[in-house]
Image (cartoon, rainbow, N blue to C red):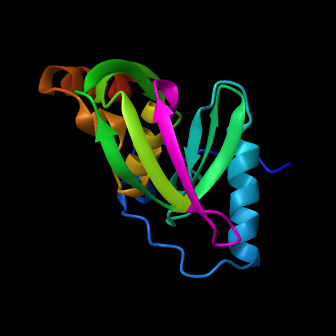
């Protein structure tokens, strides 16, 4: 099992747009194994490749006992009106803020064999799909907060012992 260290707020890879995966080789297979191993730890709903220092479009998820991954994921459809849901992030440890998220999402990506995977998610799965796709676009959940909440998040980050 390879649980890779999580990159924290301030690391430039977290603000970088991740590159598409062009070809699946041993390096990509190893990346997926590391992502899946990393997301299996308690309290983790998703881990994006950028969070372990790899700027490629891949993430793993662990929601309601379902563990999986997507390569080159994209959100196909968002349903309903965005609702503020308490959200945290492994890259911004210890902080939780109400973040606007769509209640239902459909995402598409591929597996290691190039097969298309479509995931329809509600509640936590919808939130995880949006959160991890944001990571791959160089966005953290705190970037989606209202101004007063973002100001408070930045204050708490500056005062944290990990920053």
Q: Is residue 19 magenta?
A: no
Count up the numbered dots. Answer: 0
| Residue at 36 percent of width and 63 percent of height | 17
**How far from the left and from the top, in percent, is residue 18?**
43, 65
In the depicted structure, whether residue 119 falls above or below residue 148: below
Task: Answer with left or right where residue 145 lies relative to residue 115.
Answer: left
Using the image, determine if residue 18 lies above or below residue 130.
Answer: below
Q: Position of residue 3 (x, y in %)?
A: 75, 46
Q: Is residue 163 visible?
A: no
Q: Is residue 133 shown above or below 53?
A: above
> In this view of the protein, can residue 18 be seen by the observer?
yes
Residue at 13 percent across and 27 percent down: it is 147
Seen from the viewer's position, the closer of residues 137 and 155 is: 137
The residue most toward the left is 147
**Residue stretch rendered in magenta on the structure:** 110-125
> Which image quarter: residue 145?
top left
- Image coordinates of residue 64 in percent, x first then y, are 66, 25
Residue at (24% x, 20% y) in the render: 152
- On the image, which quarter does residue 28 sit in? bottom right
Q: State left or right for residue 4 relative to residue 89.
A: right
Name the side, left or right, on which 106 lies relative to 156: right
Question: As rendered, which of 162 and 82 lies closer to the eye?
Answer: 82
Placement of 143 over or under 153, stated as above or below: below
Residue 121's x, y, as percent?
49, 35
In the rendered image, the quadrant that contains the C terminus is top left
């Amino acid at each position: 099992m390879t649980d890779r260290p999580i990159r924290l707020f301030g690391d430039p890879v977290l603000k970088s747009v991740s590159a598409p995966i062009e070809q699946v080789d041993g390096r990509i297979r190893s990346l997926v194994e590391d992502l899946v191993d990393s997301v299996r730890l308690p309290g983790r709903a998703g881990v994006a490749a950028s969070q372990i220092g790899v700027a490629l479009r891949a993430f793993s998820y662990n929601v309601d006992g379902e563990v999986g991954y997507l390569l080159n994921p994209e959100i196909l459809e968002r349903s309903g009106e965005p609702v503020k849901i308490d959200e945290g992030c492994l890259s911004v440890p210890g902080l939780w803020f109400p973040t606007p998220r769509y209640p239902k999402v459909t995402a598409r990506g591929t597996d290691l064999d190039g097969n298309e995977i479509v995931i329809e998610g509600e509640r936590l799965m919808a939130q995880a799909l949006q959160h991890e796709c944001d990571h791959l676009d160089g966005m953290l959940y705190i970037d989606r907060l209202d101004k007063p909440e973002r100001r408070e998040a930045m204050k708490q980050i500056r005062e944290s012992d990990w920053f």
